[in-house]
Image: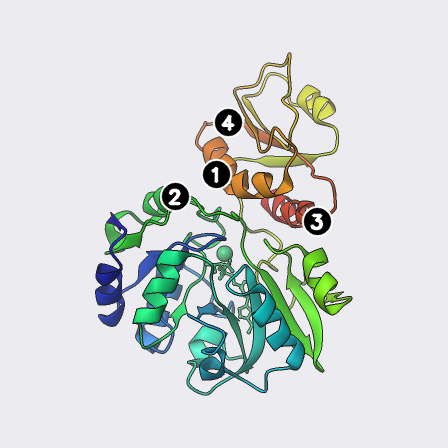
Amino acid sequence: MLTTDISKAKEALENDDLIAIPTETVYGLAGNAFSDSAVKKIFDLKQRPHYNPLIVHIPSVDFLNKVAKDIPPIALTLAQHFWPGPLTLVLKKQPTVPDMVTAGKDTVAVRMPDHALTLALLKELDFPLAAPSANPFGCISPSTAEHVYNYFHDTLPVILDGGPCQKGIESTIIGFENNEPILYRHGSLAIEDIENLIGPVKTNTLNNANPQAPGMLSKHYAPKTRTYLTDDIYKSLAEFEGKRIGVMMFRDKVTGKDIVHQEVLSLNGDMKEAARNLYKAMHILDHQELDVIIVEKFPDINLGITINDRLNRATKL
Ligand code: TXA
Ligand code: MG
C-alpha cells in the first residue's frame, strides 16, 4: 500500500516485515539491519545472490559508530561533508551487523540518505535499515513509489511514498584500502565533487570475477527489451529500419524518423535533470513493446560518467 504515514512503516519494521522507503537516489527495499530474519527476507524477495552485500541506512553521522569501527579520518570528512546525501562508505563493521548484511565480509556499506520522510522514520527506530534498491535482481531501479508497486504489488505492507527521487541514480560508493579512498561504484555524487574535497581517488569499479561492489556485476539495471548504446544515433536508426524502435536521447530530439516512442532526458542539456529522468525513461520505454531501444551515449564528464556506466550495464548482452 502506498502511504506517507511513517507510523505504519515503523510498525511493519518492528514486526520484522519489509517496506519500501524513498531516498534521494532510488527507492529502497528496507528491513531491520540488526535482524537476521528481516535481512533474509530482503534477499529472498529480491532474488538477490547472497554474495552481494546490502547498504545500511542510518539517521545521522553520530550513528556511524554503532555499525562501523576504525573509521579513517577521510571517511569522517566525507560523511560530515556529504551526508545526508548520495554517498555510501564501506568501512570496518561492528559485530552487531549480521554477517548476512555484509555477505560475510568484515566491512559494511553505510549511508545517511537525504529524504525527509525516511530520515524522520530512521530517527524513530532503534535500529538502522538494510536496503538495496527496491527492484527484483537485475531489473531497472525504481525512482518512484509506483515503480516499486509495479514490481512487488501488495507483497509489501507499506510503500512509503516520498514522490519521485530527486537524484534518480544510486549512491556513489567509496571504500578504503590502507586508509586510501577507492571508488567502487559511480553514482549520483560526481567523482569530481569528491576529489575537490579530498584529492585524487583511485577507481576499482567493474570487476565481475570479484564483485566487490555491486553495480559491479557487468549486466545490471537492465530493461527487458534489447537495448543498444550508440555514438551515432542516425546510423543506428538506419541499421534497425523496419523494427519497432524506441529512442532515448540526452537533449536533442530525433526528427524525421519512424520512431514508436522517444524519451529526451533533458531539453536544456542539464546532466542532473537527465540523471533524475534516466530510470523513469527506461521504465517507460520498456513498456512500449518495442523490438529495440536505442540510447545515445552521454558526454563522459561529471554525472555523464555515471549515466554511461548504467547505460553500459543496461546494454550488455
Ligand atoms: O542509492 C543507493 O545506494 C540505493 C539506496 C536504496 O540507498 N541502494 C542501492 O543498493 O543501490 P544496492 O543493493 O542496489 O547496491 C548496493 C551495493 C551492492 O551492489 C554491493 O556490492 C555494495 O553496495 N556493497 C555493499 N556492501 C559492500 C561491502 N561491504 N563492500 C563492497 N561493496 C559493498
Ligand atoms: Mg540495485
Closer to the chain start, of discs 4 and 2, is: 2
Query: Residue 219: where, in percent of width, then height?
Result: 59, 51
Please name the residue that numbered disc 4 is placed on. 290
What is the crowding at mark 4: few (fewer than 14 residues within 10 Å), some, or many (at least 20)? some
The residue wearing badge 1 is 280
Along the viewing direction, whichever of 72 and 123 lies nearer the viewer: 123
Instruction: Give the number of the mark in front: 3 or 2.
Output: 3
What's the residue at 51%, 47% (across, down)? 168
Q: Earlier in the sequence, mark 4 or mark 1?
A: 1
Residue on which disc 3 sits: 302
For badge 1, the amino acid type reads Lys
Q: Are marks 1 and 2 in contact (CB under 8 Å)?
A: yes
Residue that label 2 marks: 147
Element under disc 4: loop
Quadrant in which residue 193 is drawn: bottom right
Within-10-Å neighbours for mark 3: few <14, some 14–19, many 20+: some
Q: Nearer the viewer, mark 3 or mark 4?
A: 3
